[in-house]
Image (cartoon, rainbow, N blue to C red):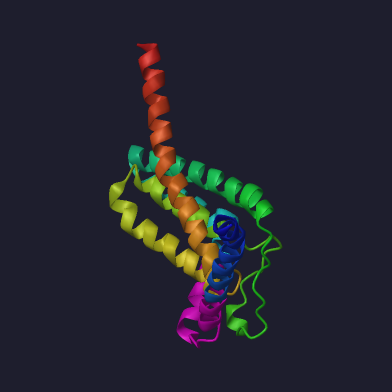
């Protein structure tokens, strides 16, 4: 009898945990939204909009391809492939499973008015793409790991700062992008090594 009661309590306990996590998520969002940061607002809004359609990462990839030699071209290719995979998984798969609405931002300053996407909020596709590019590209050029990951983190934060995502959306986007960005290079290396062994 007691085991049956415990089983019945599991769904309510899980629902309570999720409810509390959502409350914390929204509280952190509100704290950021209501903190006056006039110095940060402009740069964060521009960075958030620059990351739309992965324009930022196409620009970084172009610079790597032109100035980075062979390692730079490999880094650019790996980074853009990772962006494509992360964007597809986040926007075409996960967003269709979790129908979370975007934040309501009537109290946001006008200087934080980044473009609000039409898609659902969870997870952050911008963040997933950012970290996927950073980890995949730096697998070919390790010295770029710190600046690329820092730039990806700034993009992720900018999505909360400008009111288009909750922090939880960004956190899951970070996890998704990091997994894809670190896994894809190994898959590519394995494929290249296997092709080479088949030829020989």
Counting labels gives: 0
What residue is drawn where x is 64% and y is 47%?
93
Image quadrant holding the N terminus, namely bottom right
Outermost top residue: 200
Q: Is residue 123 visible?
A: no
Q: Position of residue 195 (x, y in %)?
A: 41, 19
Outermost bottom residue: 36
Q: Position of residue 62 (x, y in %)?
A: 46, 48
Residue 139 magenta-drawn? no
Q: Quadrant of residue 186?
A: top left
Q: Position of residue 95 (x, y in %)?
A: 65, 54
Q: Is residue 154 shown above or below 128?
A: below
Residue 36 magenta-drawn? yes
What residue is drawn where x is 56% and y is 65%?
13
Horizontal side, residue 91 vs residue 151: left or right: right
Q: Is residue 179 visible?
A: yes
What residue is drawn where x is 55% and y is 54%?
54
Image quadrant holding the C terminus, namely top left
Between residues 88 and 15, which one lies in front from this camera angle?
15
Q: Quadrant of residue 141?
A: top left
Outermost left residue: 143
First to last magenta residue range: 25-48
What residue is drawn where x is 65% and y is 79%?
105
Outermost front residue: 1
Q: Position of residue 114 (x, y in %)?
A: 61, 72
Q: Main secondary structure of the magenta part?
A: helix
Between residues 61 and 131, which one lies in front from this camera angle?
131
């Amino acid at each position: 009898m007691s085991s049956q009661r415990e089983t019945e309590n599991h769904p309510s306990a899980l629902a309570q945990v999720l409810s509390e996590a959502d409350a914390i998520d929204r509280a952190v969002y509100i704290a950021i939204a209501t903190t006056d940061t006039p110095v940060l607002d402009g740069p964060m809004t521009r960075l958030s909009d620059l990351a739309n359609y992965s324009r930022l990462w196409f620009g970084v990839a172009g610079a790597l391809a032109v100035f980075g030699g062979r390692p730079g071209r490999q880094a650019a290719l790996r980074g853009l492939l990772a962006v494509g995979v992360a964007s597809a998984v986040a926007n075409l798969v996960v967003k269709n499973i979790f129908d979370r609405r975007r934040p309501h931002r009537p109290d946001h300053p006008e200087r934080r008015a980044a473009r609000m996407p039409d898609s659902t909020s969870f997870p952050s596709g911008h963040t997933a793409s950012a970290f996927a590019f950073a980890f995949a590209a730096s697998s070919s050029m390790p010295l770029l790991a710190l600046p690329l990951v820092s730039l990806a983190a700034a993009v992720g934060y900018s999505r909360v700062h400008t009111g288009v995502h909750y922090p939880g959306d960004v956190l899951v986007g970070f996890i998704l992008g990091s997994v894809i960005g670190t896994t894809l290079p190994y898959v590519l290396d394995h494929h290249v090594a296997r092709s080479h062994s088949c030829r020989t």
